[in-house]
């Protein structure tokens, strides 16, 4: 039997597949990329509104995607919608390289933390968080911060540290699909502004 619960594998597969959105920003450019993100977000919000207001649609949505939903997402906005909001904020407020890096911190780093933590996590740091998962997040985010072109080295490392900290702390008032990219992008922008 797999050490990974089926619903978590489905959820993380969706999470990682969303990496295509930030990566497409390099190919599409800022204007077209912003339009794509705004369109995706509009669709996500529309689906959530209809789903939350119409019982028949909610039941259909849960039948199709129920395994990948967290319990609270059945009656609130989904993580995908928060991811869309953070993507739009990042694309509008920051440079394309910083936006791409911050969003990859979420899609790759957050997934690495969860999967490594579930499989090899032995040292508990906080409830539901392990040292092994946190290190996986930090390493993957650091690699992303280094390899994405257009982000100063130190800015990428600071962004990786911020993303990892937000993932570890799991701030209850901020969905991590929003907090990880937006806060790490802000940190990278500040550092990049200082180091020039």
Image: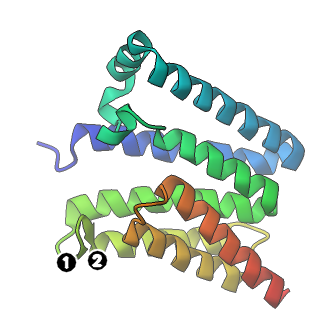
Q: Nearer the viewer, residue 86 or 134?
A: 86
Q: Is residue 188 above or below residue 25?
A: below
Q: Looking at the rendering, which quadrant does residue 159 occupy?
A: bottom right
**Which residue is denoted by mark 1 in the rendering?**
123
Q: How is the image coloured?
A: rainbow
Query: Are dots 2 and 1 in contact, CB under 8 Å?
Result: yes
Q: Position of residue 113 (x, y in %)?
A: 37, 63
Q: Residue at x 53, y 19 (%)?
A: 50
Disc 2 packing (10 Å; few <14; some 14–19; many ≥20): some
In the picture as drawn, the residue positioned furthest to the left comes out as 1
Q: Quadrant of the N terminus?
A: top left
Q: Residue at x 79, y 51 (%)?
A: 26
Q: Identify the element where label 1 is drawn.
A: loop
Q: Position of residue 189 (x, y in %)?
A: 75, 75
On screen, residue 61 versus residue 126, left or right, reads right
On screen, residue 37 versus residue 77, left or right, reads right
Q: Position of residue 151 (x, y in %)?
A: 75, 73
Q: Looking at the rendering, which quadrant does residue 132 occupy?
A: bottom left
Q: Is residue 58 above or below residue 192?
A: above
Q: Nearer the viewer, residue 196 or 88?
A: 88
Sequence order check, earlier mark of 2 and 1: 1
How many numbered dots are placed on residues in this image? 2
Q: Quadrant of the C terminus?
A: bottom right
On screen, residue 100 versus residue 1, left or right, reads right
Q: Position of residue 79 (x, y in %)?
A: 47, 43
Q: Identify the element where label 2 is drawn.
A: helix
**Which residue is denoted by mark 2 in the rendering?**
131
């Amino acid at each position: 039997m797999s050490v990974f619960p089926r619903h978590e594998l489905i959820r993380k597969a969706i999470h990682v597949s969303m990496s295509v959105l930030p990566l497409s920003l390099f190919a599409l450019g800022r204007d077209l990329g912003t339009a794509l993100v705004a369109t995706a977000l509009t669709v996500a919000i529309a689906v959530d509104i209809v789903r939350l207001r119409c019982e028949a649609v909610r039941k259909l949505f849960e039948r199709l995607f129920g395994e990948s939903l967290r319990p609270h997402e059945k009656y609130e906005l989904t993580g995908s919608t928060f991811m869309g909001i953070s993507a739009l904020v990042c694309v509008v407020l920051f440079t394309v390289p910083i936006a791409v890096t911050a969003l990859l911190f979420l899609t790759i780093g957050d997934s690495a933390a969860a999967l490594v933590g579930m499989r090899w996590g032995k040292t508990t740091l906080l409830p539901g968080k392990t040292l092994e998962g946190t290190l996986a997040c930090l390493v993957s985010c650091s690699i992303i911060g280094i390899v994405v072109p257009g982000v100063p080295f130190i800015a990428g490392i600071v962004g990786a540290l911020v993303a990892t900290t937000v993932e570890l702390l799991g701030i209850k008032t901020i969905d991590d699909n929003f907090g990880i990219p937006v806060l790490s992008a802000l940190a990278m922008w500040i550092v990049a502004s200082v180091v020039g």
